[in-house]
Image (cartoon, coloured by chain):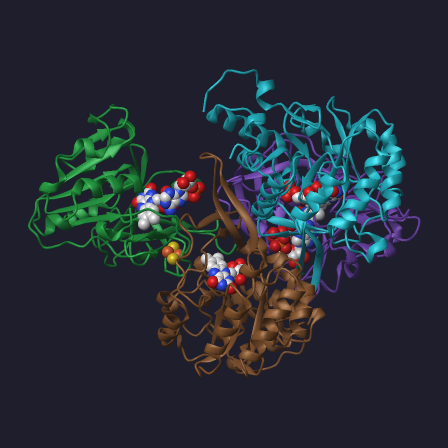
Chain colours: A brown, B cyan, C green, D purple
Amino acid sequence: MVVRERLAGEKLAVELCGIALETPLIPASGTLSKEALGEVGSVYGAILPKTTTPRARAGNPPPRIAETPAGMVNSIGLQNPGVEKFLEGLDAFDLGVPIFVSVAGDTVDEFVALCGRLAGDPRIAAVELNLSCPNVEHGGLTFCAGPASAREVIEACRDALSSKPLFAKLTNEGVVANAIAAEEAGADALTVINTIPALTIDASAQTILVRGGLSGPAIKPVALRAVYDVSRAVNIPVIASGGVSTGTDVAEFMLAGATAVQVGTASFVREPEEILSEFSEYLDRMGTTASELTGAL
Amino acid sequence: MVVRERLAGEKLAVELCGIALETPLIPASGTLSKEALGEVGSVYGAILPKTTTPRARAGNPPPRIAETPAGMVNSIGLQNPGVEKFLEGLDAFDLGVPIFVSVAGDTVDEFVALCGRLAGDPRIAAVELNLSCPNVEHGGLTFCAGPASAREVIEACRDALSSKPLFAKLTNEGVVANAIAAEEAGADALTVINTIPALTIDASAQTILVRGGLSGPAIKPVALRAVYDVSRAVNIPVIASGGVSTGTDVAEFMLAGATAVQVGTASFVREPEEILSEFSEYLDRMGTTASELTGAL
Amino acid sequence: MKFHGVKIEDREWIGGYTLIRYRWDGAIEPGQFAMARVAGYPVTFDPFLARPFSFYDHDGETASLLFEVRGRGTALLDDAPDRIEVSSPLGRGFRINGANGPVALLGGGIGVAPLKVLSRRLDALSVPHDVFLGFADARYAAVAGEFPGAKVATVDGSAGVQGTVLDAAPDLTRYTAVYACGPNPMLAAVKRAAGEDAFCQLSVEERMGCGNGSCNGCVVPVRDGGYVRSCIEGPVFDAEALAW
Amino acid sequence: MKFHGVKIEDREWIGGYTLIRYRWDGAIEPGQFAMARVAGYPVTFDPFLARPFSFYDHDGETASLLFEVRGRGTALLDDAPDRIEVSSPLGRGFRINGANGPVALLGGGIGVAPLKVLSRRLDALSVPHDVFLGFADARYAAVAGEFPGAKVATVDGSAGVQGTVLDAAPDLTRYTAVYACGPNPMLAAVKRAAGEDAFCQLSVEERMGCGNGSCNGCVVPVRDGGYVRSCIEGPVFDAEALAW
Ligand SMILES: Cc1cc2nc3c(=O)[nH]c(=O)nc-3n(C[C@H](O)[C@H](O)[C@H](O)COP(=O)(O)OP(=O)(O)OC[C@H]3O[C@@H](n4cnc5c(N)ncnc54)[C@H](O)[C@@H]3O)c2cc1C
Ligand SMILES: Cc1cc2nc3c(=O)[nH]c(=O)nc-3n(C[C@H](O)[C@H](O)[C@H](O)COP(=O)(O)OP(=O)(O)OC[C@H]3O[C@@H](n4cnc5c(N)ncnc54)[C@H](O)[C@@H]3O)c2cc1C
Ligand SMILES: Cc1cc2nc3c(=O)[nH]c(=O)nc-3n(C[C@H](O)[C@H](O)[C@H](O)COP(=O)(O)O)c2cc1C
Ligand SMILES: Cc1cc2nc3c(=O)[nH]c(=O)nc-3n(C[C@H](O)[C@H](O)[C@H](O)COP(=O)(O)O)c2cc1C
Ligand code: FES
Ligand code: FES
């Protein structure tokens, strides 16, 4: 490995679908609120707020979260004020870095309408389709339950978004087949993975505690495999999500093939700044840069 | 909950496919060696050695294991001496409790031949089909990659085994559809789940460390959901596997619907005896018995 | 979420509860809370989440937390040799409405925690107040010794009157303000007992993921429909705002 | 796997290594190992696995482990206030072939660990032996002070001769037995240097899951084909049995 001297900026910078990111870190959708923006400083290369939907959603009744070994299960139910209120408040997310917006609908038409609504907003650098929400037209299976339904929604959204980059966020189940379909359908990048379906039970109360998605360090090896396999199956950039908690984790995901890396649950227990500085130290130790790391395995 | 007085034996006993088990705990296949049998005393209701195959298998080159957050990834590659040597040494596993045998083949015919070989052996109380091994006739997809291939191998083995109970061990991906197919094909019980496909990377060496299956506490919430969903989809008993590490975990899996519970990776770091005694204390505290717990949620 | 390490100055066991003190000179409002955990990240990620605790007391130099050991998070804090990590102060505390009393403070079980610093603040403002505390039994009720003059109830009758905290309290409608903390069912009962027009503030207890508004995990249902986050809009709410 | 808690009697830092001692009166064979971890299960499951360590010394009453901090498992053991958990003694140690010497002991880096108790055993049997140790640099080489008369090599030449442990050793074929512990590439080099017919025993270093033969994780390739478990059939093997 050749040790080179660089500006700190160059060291951490990456390019994602033509968008320059000062660092490869992005907050995972649904894990960074407006109120917490003050804590993230210049850690993130882009900002990605919680998924927005056509209309306001109240979300699920509590309890919504439960801790599990090295992770947590959540069932928030996409609580959000709806896309119009969301756009009214979007300026709060302007930290001087690109803003990506995550969207979800109950039907393909809703996805398309959301993309149409966002297509002309110059504040938005790219749109991430949250395809792990249930498709009410297909018996509650998620939009990425299989290649056919993933393809359908992505093709339609690709048109609706005109020139804005489209990221398709996929779940772990069947991820490689869905990734190939998503690329063919015109996705510009793939976010891999979302939470893994899981359940927690309160044995003392003999009740279900939370039925939802598992996230956190526990799922990191599963996400790493998905990112690695998907990176080798497609030619578009992969954005990693799943258990990233340390700078070494960031390096592992980039080595596996990711161009950018989302930090989700770990930001509840660590400062993202620590993760970035660990990653920066890793780059120094190895005498390399973030962009050189992608797929360097 | 009515508090009753019972013999310790009655408290822990369960019945699985007509087989009386003194406790609901069973070692997960591949996690208890002959050499370690001395440590397990009378903790287990049945013994289940590592999967055996038609011929000896050397297994994969090291490194075969890597630690992950609250878990580990393994890629042993079914190292075993082959079914004939296995049967020669089977008496070593006789602790006075039923012996279950796990089998795997590269083709349906190999599975059938293995079941035929075991069908007449009176020492064997039941056979578990390890369906997460690759099916060489189907491009390396596992036998439980989908309902059709699961059905094919189970139907064939059901015949070959004559009257011995057949357990089908399923992976997490697509587990409910596979479970329904397995029941229809004649499985007497389902073991849910096997390890989850995963990858570990050594960031310092910039190499893949282990590509294999994730096990341990990290996967417990995923296994719990699989056990819960499968229990509600089929009418045959479910045997839980995945992250069981404490007595409370045993209770959670039984509440979710399991009739018996396998202890795997956790036995590397805890004495199975501790897990059983925690479970026994739980039953006392709740004034219930193991068999009453199944599905009591 | 940013955590900082603090050194535990001392640790005391009062009845069924643990009291820990650490030096901390920031300002807090009564009812605000801290997320706390034992040190160790990123060497260990299990247990994963920090746990929320109300500030029990704060004299400008030393903060204290009072807690009950329930599961592994609190067990570790109980054991932690001398350093823990905290993120604080978080949330919105009790609002003091300027009426000059008398006001009622009600605590159920470990819900006693935020009442000490609230009582201290009321004293500073010379607002007369009565304290009513309910516990499971005399062992837990021992902490009432920290609240001179408090009326106590225990479920098993082993200390104070037999019953819940409301059995120890007189008609709540005669107070100009009612403040309560405890399990959600107790809070709902206090809300009813305080009456429709009361100035009544409740500190709710929900499971928390982040403590900074990011996860939407800690919500309570509100009268206007939907849910709000108790770590940001709460943990103290006007009783009338809650949908229970 | 059964672990038992032991109290650390003392802790010493020798060069780049940590030495911990605890009371333990079982018997051990030189080359046997312990699985060790900080206490905490089932309250925490991260880190998940225990780590293997050769017994460094054992005088019948006190056992000691010498280790290098590499990752989080060893970092925690280095920090652990006073109690750790161990499972031991495990594996097959060095076989002493009855020849009356001289024999050679070679250690590479932390591979020095099992040589102390082996040297003690050879002394007891009056078998003359020479010790050769290789380290990265002088800081690590400081532990050679524990082996009076040992010849030392360092990769950077900051102590002893410059090079690997084999550069510090004379022709190994003149010894009646050769014992070595260190990274696998070093062991392969020792095997070659000892020659075909030598009585040469190597303590291998593989990642371990269980330590009791259950996981098949710790295997080494053997000449007869296939793999054997180093926690049961090893960690010490006859060099000729290994396929490298
Ligand atoms: C704003 C706020 C302030 C609090 N202040 C205090 C305080 O001052 N002192 C104190 O002892 N406790 C307080 N709690 C409750 C405290 O957070 C929980 O007792 C603690 O999180 C339990 O952690 P554990 O790891 O010990 O238990 P776990 O192992 O996580 O769970 C054990 C049991 O505790 C219950 N539990 C877990 N988390 C919560 C939670 N967040 N709220 C309610 N019940 C829970 C569960 O029902 C579970 O059965 C407060 C909670 C909130 C939201
Ligand atoms: C039989 C045996 C005896 C040993 N005796 C000693 C001893 O006396 N003193 C000592 O310091 N070490 C000894 N080791 C090595 C020791 O087990 C590892 O250094 C330790 O497991 C590292 O744990 P960690 O959590 O600090 O590192 P991890 O975070 O697990 O890994 C850090 C780095 O250490 C390396 N590593 C991890 N585990 C092993 C392993 N089992 N073997 C080799 N390298 C590994 C990895 O390459 C990794 O890059 C022995 C190993 C074996 C198999
Ligand atoms: C509390 C919570 C809320 C989430 N909300 C969303 C969401 O609104 N949209 C989405 O695409 N993913 C959502 N996710 C998933 C995360 O974006 C991320 O993909 C997942 O948690 C795995 O990454 P992690 O382990 O780093 O958290 C949420 C996750 C959590 C924990
Ligand atoms: C080292 C190791 C070896 C395993 N070998 C087998 C095997 O031979 N056959 C099998 O069906 N499952 C095997 N498994 C999977 C376990 O039986 C179990 O289903 C899985 O590990 C999940 O449970 P756990 O988290 O309790 O370990 C193995 C698991 C491990 C960790
Ligand atoms: S605890 Fe995460 S939003 Fe309140
Ligand atoms: S460490 Fe598990 S078999 Fe050797």
> Eyeballing the image, is A184 above or below B80?
below
Q: Which of the 4 image quarters holds residue B54? A: top right
Tell me the residue at 48%/23% (across/down). Answer: B287
Please identify the residue farthest to the front as the structure is shown: A137
Specify whether B3 is left or right of D156: left
Report the front residue among B277 and D30.
B277
Question: x and y percent of residue B260 in the render?
Answer: 64, 32
Q: Nearer the viewer, residue B114 or B63?
A: B114
Residue A55 screen position, x and y as percent: 41, 66
Q: Position of residue C151 (x, y in %)?
A: 16, 33
Q: Nearer the viewer, residue D6 or B38?
A: B38
With D223 as the anchor, is A61 left or right in this view?
A: left
Q: Is residue D114 visible?
A: no
Farthest residue to the right: give it: D197
Q: Position of residue A175 (x, y in %)?
A: 65, 62
Q: Residue at x 58, y 72 (%)?
A: A283
Left or right of B77 in this view: C3: left
Image quarter in which the C terminus of chain D is found: bottom right
User: The N terminus of chain D is located in which quarter?
Assistant: top right
